[in-house]
Amino acid sequence: MGILEKQQYNLSLSKKTYGYKAAIDILDEEFSEFVDNKISIDEFFKIYHDYFYEISDKTHKKIIEDSINYLEGYVHPKEKTIEHLSDQLKQLQHQIDSTERHHPFFENGMVLLSKTYQSIDISSGTKYYMHSGKKRPILQHSVYSNIKKRLKVDKSDKEFIHFIAPNGLNAISTGPPINSTTDMFASIKSINVWPEPEFPQN
């Protein structure tokens, strides 16, 4: 093999330099790429509305829950409306329950007794006082006598009492019993809503 001859190469190296002003113009002095740019509230809600239907239900619920927890004592306007309507319904129901009712055939203040006792001693039969369209059983004959006196009735018992067929008597709604003379002055509402529901409605 022959001996390789050494060859010489000339390489041209160059270095580009910048003055201070040029460097400032070219380089990002404040590293804006690394800064977390803040957005305004309006911009946030614009983005929120733009992607509203793309946001998951879980995220929507989370936003609502966080907002409600942040606003102490917050009540949704619909809840206020429902509460107001509920109060109105209660007032209306109170007015309805407090309105005197009437039976189509037997007036309030009448005393009824089954025809079974028309020809025998009436003291043994349960008499009923008509009150707001209901028959209220008078539990003692002595109480009936006191009621008759209070009503200032100047008639015999058989003239004063209205005798009706047992089936007709059973068809009339029953009200709260009368244990004493003062019971006949119970409020109209207490008569109309009797008996009270087992589980009162709110």
Image: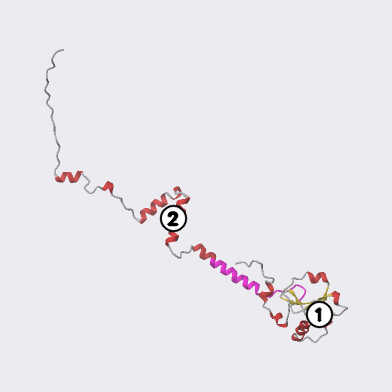
Residue at 69% x, 81% y: name it. 185
Q: Quadrant of the N terminus?
A: top left
**Callout 1 amino acid:** Ile
Quadrant in the picture for residue 93: bottom right
| Figure disc tally | 2
Q: Nearer the viewer, mark 1 or mark 2?
A: 2
Quadrant in the picture for residue 133: bottom right
- Residue 55, percent across and down? 44, 49
Q: Quadrant of the C terminus?
A: bottom right
Q: Is residue 187 above or below residue 72?
A: below
Q: Is residue 135 above or below residue 83?
A: below
Predominant SS of the magenta segment: helix
- Residue 68, percent across and down? 45, 60
* Residue 141 visible in image: yes
Residue range corresponding to the magenta coloring:
83-107
3D distance between C-alphas at marks 1 and 2: 73 Å
Residue at 36% x, 55% y: name it. 42
Left or right of 132 on screen, residue 10: left
Which residue position is annotated with label 1? Answer: 161
**Callout 2 amino acid:** Ile
| 140 vs 156, nearest the viewer | 140
Residue at 47% x, 51% y: name it. 58
Q: Local crowd at mark 1 within 10 Å, few (<14), some, or many (≥20)? A: some
Which residue position is annotated with label 2? Answer: 63
Mark 2: secondary structure? helix
Left or right of 35 on screen, residue 169: right
| 128 vs 125, nearest the viewer | 125
Q: Are marks 1 and 2 in contact (CB under 8 Å)?
A: no
Left or right of 91 on screen, residue 174: right
